[in-house]
Amino acid sequence: MSVFMIIRIAFKALSRNKMRTALTMLGMIIGVAAVITMVALGTGAQTSIDAAVQSAGTNTVIVSAGNFTQGGVRQGQGNASTLIPDDAVAISQLPGILYTAAGSSTRAQMIAGNQNWNTQAQGTDVDLPLINAWPIAEGAFFTPQDVTTAAKVVVLGAVVRDQLFGGPDVSPIGQVIRIQHQPFTVVGVMVSKGQSSMGQDRDDTVFVPYTTVMKKMRGVTFINNVTVAAAEASQVTAVADRIATLLRVRHKIAPGDPDDFMVRTIEEMASVRKEATQTMTALLASIAGVSLLVGGIGIMNIMLVSVTERTREIGLRMAIGARGRDVLLQFLVEAIVLSLFGGGIGIALGFGVAQGVTLWQGWPTTVSPNAVFLAFGFAAATGVFFGFYPAQKAAALDPIDALRFE
């Protein structure tokens, strides 16, 4: 019997019970769609991280305050008060460093007229736009003199501008807003930057001199972080090591004692984020793969039922000359058809769900060709694996016993 005839008979057999065929494919459809969607979300997140690294600059180093312990209670990273403005000045004098920007931030209510908005007041220095390659859309960034005098000037992110002044058509330059009940003059608006790799909206913030945050908003003498740009990307590791050595000396940390600061490069942080994303994607894809396994078992069960229902048909075919391998191939083709059709529909559904997540939630998704081939190949392999036993059982039937079967 020709392969074409076997395929034709297989399709005809499946079309007799359309509802059962559709329900049998459902497990495969859901499994493949879930794998495609989960991998698309994971790949999209990794792409977003790569874009964020490029946007921030591969030559960026972040120095943050470290752990603070009092009375045996460890407060965690970021709570130490040992990082001071003079540390930032000393760091800026190290070889291989292009820009530095000390930072001290707080959250506050912003008020402009009858509008208000709660967001982060990011205290920083004049080099921050240069470090992050973040241009000014309107007005100008504050000046070194503003930092020295702790001036009450503010640069708005695009979201804050829209919330306080009604949108991009209204210029806020020269307007006065109140932050923690103190008047600040708006001197600039940043270009819209969008979300970071961590999902934070970088436009939902305002920038003020870090000295203003320290002295007039928080009343402290320490800073939270120092953002550093190395002169060349190839020098980032060496620069990070120099900073760590310098701060250990300045903070009088004895050999063997833990640092009271953290030095991280953008690439290191992105690498950690990528590893976490890849682990989560693999976990979710594995869970989705269980659906494929369940779908395969469902196909095997239905094929076994089909063998029982069609025992007399199999006996009749074998009595008029069909060979065992023809029967084997027919039932195997039926199982593969169920898997491939279910896999094809699942791929289309996975594409649709991934695009829907992007449109409705704004989450980045990227459907990888490797994920498509993997899911489709797994569907085909499932059909062969779980369809082989029912097909072999059908091919092994004795024609005489099959004809007597009721």
Image (cartoon, rainbow, N blue to C red):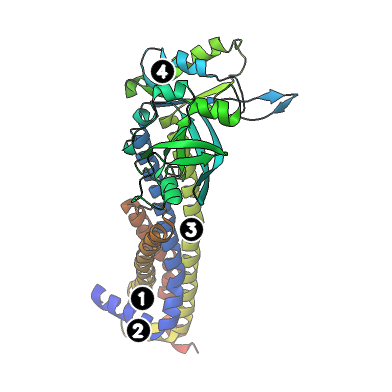
Tell me whether circle 2 and circle 3 mark residues in contact (CB < 8 Å): no
Looking at the image, which is closer to me, 34 or 61? 61
Identify the residue position indicated by label 3 in the image: 288
Q: Residue at x 44, y 58 (%)?
A: 361
Q: Nearer the viewer, mark 4 or mark 3?
A: 4
Looking at the image, which is closer to me, 282 or 67? 67
User: Considering only vertical position in the picture, is 61 above or below 174?
Assistant: above
Tell me the quadrant of the picture where the N terminus can be found. Answer: bottom left
Identify the residue position indicated by label 4 in the image: 239
Q: CA separation, marks 2 and 3?
A: 40 Å
Sequence-wise, which precedes: disc 4 or disc 1?
4
Sequence-wise, which precedes: disc 4 or disc 3?
4
User: Considering only vertical position in the picture, is 390 above or below 114?
Assistant: below
Quarter of the figure with residue 341:
bottom left
Looking at the image, which is closer to me, 401 or 220? 220
Q: Residue at x 33, y 20 (%)?
A: 231
Identify the residue position indicated by label 2 in the image: 317
Q: CA separation, marks 4 and 3?
A: 44 Å
Disc 3 residue type (three-letter) = Ala
Residue 195 placement (x, y as % from top left) = 41, 45
Disc 4 residue type (three-letter) = Val
Q: Residue at x 62, y 28 (%)?
A: 79
User: Considering only vertical position in the picture, is 204 above or below 267?
Assistant: below
Tell me whether circle 1 and circle 2 mark residues in contact (CB < 8 Å): yes
Sequence-wise, which precedes: disc 2 or disc 4?
4
Q: CA separation, marks 1 and 3?
A: 33 Å
User: Considering only vertical position in the picture, is 167 above or below 402?
Assistant: above
Q: Nearer the viewer, mark 1 or mark 3?
A: 3
Q: CA separation, marks 1 and 2?
A: 8 Å
